[in-house]
Amino acid sequence: MTREAVVEGYERFLGDAVEQTVEAFSLTRAVQNGVETPGSGLVDKLLKNSERVQQTVVQPELEGFRDRAFEQFDVLLDYAESDEGIEAYRDPLTSVGAFETELRDDLSPERREEVLDFMVGRYERFGDALVPLLESDETEFWPAAVAALNADQAHELVEEHFRYTKPLREYPDAFRLVATVDASDVIGPFGLLAGSLTVVYTDEAVRATAAAEDTVIREVKGEIDSRFDG
């Protein structure tokens, strides 16, 4: 399969997952549970303008994650196409990773390396799982998947490697996802008088992305069943 076809398949999945996460994300939960800066009046204003906050804050945050994940996937494909071990790609993978940038600043060096080792191990297994697809003579994603894998292997690949937020669930204390909400971006120029809020949305991100993953993975598995049965 061409590299472009693999990228297209992955981008389709991750794009769907981000859209589902945006829909599942609860601004109310995030703001009520994660506001660090005092200002209940501003909280009320933001919640009354929740649709605007979704558009100006939540969606750009999640789209930024998606874009970093795409960049990281390119590096992962470099590994899958090479004869080098994963350690040769450790720094490139972790320097552009969507979650590596969200590691807590106060983690001990030992804890940080433990989390990174876990993540790099996942990248290695994912890259290895992509090799049969890349080596297929087929030029499109699904024909290559059917030629290179059986249905059980395809299900396993999706279940194991498409749960991209697993590090957040395995090491919930290691990450801190934060967004600053400027009132002027939400309620117009007069919002300058209201200031801004710092929102820690790690817990809500984990909840929403887990729900999105479940939905998208179920859909992908359904497509696998139809493709392989056909």
Image (tube, rainbow, N blue to C red):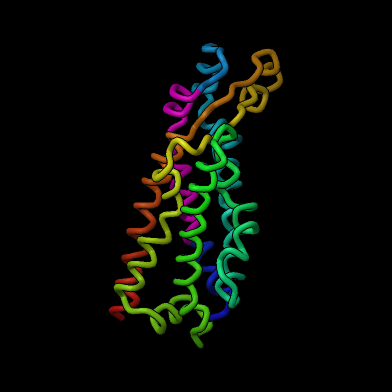
Left or right: where does residue 48 sit relative to residue 92? left
Identify the residue at image location x=51%, y=28%. Answer: 50
Identify the residue at image location x=35%, y=61%. Answer: 159
**Can you say whether 45 is above or below 68 in the image?**
above
Position of residue 194 measured from the top left corner of the image (x, y, whole percent)? 64, 14
Identify the residue at image location x=57%, y=79%. Answer: 2
Stretch in magenta = 13-34
Residue 150 falls in which quadrant of the image? Answer: bottom left
Of 74 and 46, the residue lying toward us: 74
Residue reaching furthest to the front:
110
Position of residue 74 measured from the top left corner of the image (x, y, whole percent)? 61, 65
Left or right: where does residue 99 sit relative to residue 184? left
Of 156 and 128, the residue lying toward us: 128
**Can you say whether 55 is above or below 165 in the image?**
above
Q: Is residue 18 magenta?
A: yes
Position of residue 101 measured from the top left corner of the image (x, y, whole percent)? 60, 44
Q: Is residue 207 magenta?
A: no
Q: Main secondary structure of the magenta part?
A: helix
Of the 4 image quadrants, the one containing the C terminus is bottom left
Of 184 and 176, the residue lying toward us: 176
**Can you say whether 35 is above or below 76 in the image?**
above
Of 210 and 79, the residue lying toward us: 79
Position of residue 180 measured from the top left corner of the image (x, y, whole percent)? 61, 28
Left or right: where does residue 204 sit relative to residue 227? right
